[in-house]
Amino acid sequence: MIRIVIRSASQTWSRVLVALVGCVMLASFAGLFVLEGQIRNGGRGDLVLPLRSATTMVFLAAVAGSAAVGAVLALRRPANLAGWLFLALGKSIALSAVAESYAVQGAIVDPGSLPGARLVAVYADGVYGNIGNTLEHLLWSELRYHQHLSPASRPELPARAEHPELSVLQRLADDSAGKWAKLVDSLREPGAKMQLHDGKRSAATIVTELLMHGCEHRAHVGTILGARGIEPPDLDAWAWGIFVGGDDWPADWGPEPQVRIPPFAKR
């Protein structure tokens, strides 16, 4: 008798939870279509999800398949964790799509129209975590490399933030740029050895790691932006030389402006 009551209660709660997940997923899809309509009406049809593309079909199949398998398992075998994991997977995929459209509408198409859209855009996942954490890791590492090459002054590193705000990232970037600008004319000899936590490393190794590490993670950020239809500014050495170093203006770039404002300096 007791087992029957427990089994009945378990099945009841399973139905309730499955129904709640289903409602969340339906609401997610409804929100997705509303947001996509707003993006299209805002004149940014290039950022609208291609609903008839193979990629979108695979996405919808993954969501529907995960949810269906999860619902069946959860209802028939509530004690089987696999069913709940499949349900959670389907729900998370659906919510990620809504988050992407939310960020596009509120941060690109109509900036400021949706609360928290900029943060959603920054913290959308990519190859190396999200943009915020990737940039925090990159900039903090730049300051650490600077510290390695400044053994005399040994500047203190800033405290790390688990979820850095945009203002924190801007301060880190300004701090790193200022310190490296001062250090570049007084770098140690390439073969000079610096004592790090895992052994001695030459100054040349540290500078090389600074450059390669930055390229790698900026590429990760570019991947996240590109996946959301955002064209990142030119950040390569050629663009820096043209806008900052006074190199010749490329003919295929059109008329040379009176004032060269780097695209990566616009805010």
Image: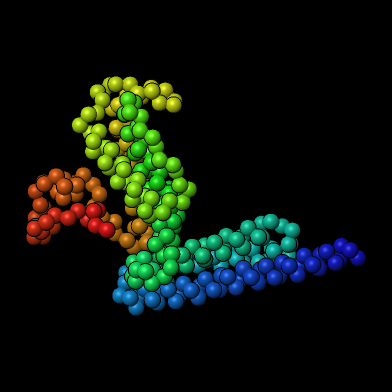
Q: Residue at x 86, y 66 (%)?
A: 4
Q: Is residue 18 above or below residue 144?
A: below
What is the quadrant of residue 101 in the picture?
bottom left
Residue 87 makes an appearance in the image: yes
**Quarter the N terminus occupies:** bottom right
**Quarter the C terminus occupies:** bottom left
Q: Position of residue 77 (x, y in %)?
A: 74, 62
Outermost residue to the right: 1
Q: Position of residue 219 (x, y in %)?
A: 33, 48
Q: Is residue 86 above or below residue 137?
A: below
- Count every numbered label the image shows and give the total: 0
Q: Residue at x 23, y 47 (%)?
A: 236
What is the quadrant of residue 205 in the picture?
top left
Q: Position of residue 164 (x, y in %)?
A: 43, 51
Q: On the rendered structure, is 237 left or right of 104?
A: left
Q: On the rendered structure, is 242 left or right of 36?
A: left
Residue closest to the eye, 253 or 266: 266
Q: Position of residue 197 (x, y in %)?
A: 44, 26
